[in-house]
Amino acid sequence: MEKERLSANEDCHASLGIDDLSAFRLLTNSVFLPVNEAPGRVMSNDNLYAVFSERFVETDTFIRSPDGSDLYSYADLDHYSAVYADRLKVLGAVPGDRIMVQMEKSSSCLFLYFACLRGGFVYLPLNTAYQPEELAYFAENAEPAVVVTSPLQKPVFEGFAQCPVETLDPEGHGSFSDQLPDSATGEIVSRSYDDLAAILYTSGTTGKPKGAMLSHGNLTSNAKTLHALWGFVPGDVLLHALPIFHVHGLFVATNVAVFNGSTLLFFNKFDAASVVNALPTASVYMGVPTNYTRMLSEPSLDRSSCANMRLFISGSAPLLTQTFRDFETRTDHTILERYGMTETGMNTSNPLVGVRKPGTVGPPLPGVDIRIVDDSNQTVTDGETGNLLVTGPNVFSGYWRMPEKNLQEFSDGYFRTGDLASRDEDGYISIVGRSKDLIITGGLNVYPKEVESVIDRMEGVNESAVIGVPHADFGEAVTAVVVLDDGSSISENDVVAHLKSTLANFKVAKQVHFVNELPRNAMGKVQKNLLRDEYDTGVR
């Protein structure tokens, strides 16, 4: 069977530019999937955990930490996900309930994610940098049945959460694990394709974050497609140094690796020197552009350190062409860039076999359809810039409890991404801008309105505009341009300190400029393009 899978993988590589969608589906359905998913058979359970459990071998290694202190098998994954799921039931959670999680990256956190899948609960991870004001909004909006967090954060959540608040630390200790059942039911709750698996909050242009609802079907389709498209094979080891509260680290890196039954070489956080030193023990690495720029600063990164590596993948923000070229020169590896977002998972990818064009994110994934349209919703010609719309089995169903927003964001079955893009003659997509004014810093999304709202509440501030300017390390740096009231003595340090007390650190302005007035057009709209031009330092 292993030989058949490898052979099919090689056949898949040969066709990857992939134009023949029917051939791709035949491969993914009849070769890469377990027997009960083959054509003509109907799965009795669309639960993503059921899909995973059909594929992994319990004796294989699931997690290995770089220092060897953490070592778990797929049997451990099955055990802990089962007892964690039963513990959530004891706490009163029922299928469909939201489980809100704010924890440091750890094996325990992953076990909790898989427990939510198998128990039919809706997993709701939160960035560990979020501050109390942000957390209170999430708790009010999502109405979780259970919150699981670190011991230090428990008092914060108890101040506003209307549900049990349990603790779980990176070592697996806390009130949640203190009362685990002696034995587990082992149940994998039946879920349909459209049942919710997760809600991930993404910053909103109105200042309020939006909860993107992702189904078991959305996540399954993306995992299967990427597994085949990126040529995962038995024995692949994924070097995992991404956060797991984010689509990239959780639904791309983790899901694809587990669908393959791979070992995760599991770093609690990214450290360039440590990651480069570990490359000889891995075969696949997924990172954000900032990771790659920092790896290039390590003298030990060279062809020999990457000799065992099969694939480097970049996403979450545009990769600079210079970084692409420098990495290729140093390592003899060409980074594969792709494009996705919280609401859709992955949409496009440069090919595994074929030309990987710098500055592009490749063609649409099989089964994903992309339109690039003008403001009148008419398709633009190749080479022209327009609004990027996407549809496919990976696309979310909408935002949690925002029906009016959902009507605005979907058009004829296509989701309006808010990105500006163009398509070349080979079908490769380039992301050229963001119509929704999004800032991507270090691979994380920041919407200016949310930051502006916090600054504008400060005593002595008249108004503000927040922009992203090019930054060699982070891709873009959050930059605030502030107009003060007459007589106000607010300083840059005052603004930064206020932001740090209210928002996650990645949203905090790295620079604050003070001006007498903001540039506006005839309609009174702030001309942020002029501000970006003025404060662009030329660093790229």
Image (spheres, rainbow, N blue to C red):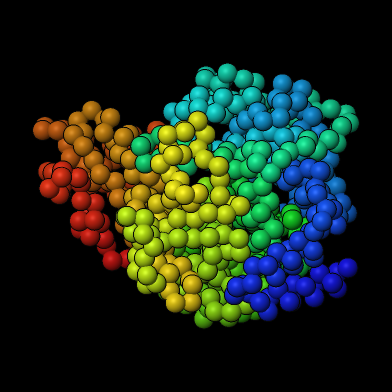
* The C terminus sits in image quarter: bottom left
Q: In the rendered image of this protein, does residue 499 appear above or below residue 23? A: above
Q: How many marks?
A: 0
* Residue 230, x across and y down, in percent: 65, 67
As rendered, which of 299 and 371 lies closer to the eye?
A: 371
User: Relative to 464, is 137 on the left or the right?
Assistant: right
As rendered, which of 120 and 487 lies closer to the eye?
A: 120
Residue plotted at (74% across, 67% down) = 27
* Residue 54, x across and y down, in percent: 83, 51
User: Relative to 262, is 538 on the left or the right?
Assistant: left
Residue plotted at (37% across, 41% down) = 205
User: Relative to 52, is 207 on the left or the right?
Assistant: left
* The N terminus sits in image quarter: bottom right
Toward which corner of the image does residue 174 lie, by quadrant?
top right
* Residue 182, x across and y down, in percent: 88, 29
Toward which corner of the image does residue 371 lie, by quadrant?
bottom left
* Residue 321, x across and y down, in percent: 43, 73
- In the rendered image, is residue 127 in sight? no
User: Relative to 210, is 436 on the left or the right?
Assistant: left
Residue plotted at (81% across, 69% down) = 5
Residue plotted at (70% across, 64% down) = 25
- In the rendered image, is residue 329 in sight? yes
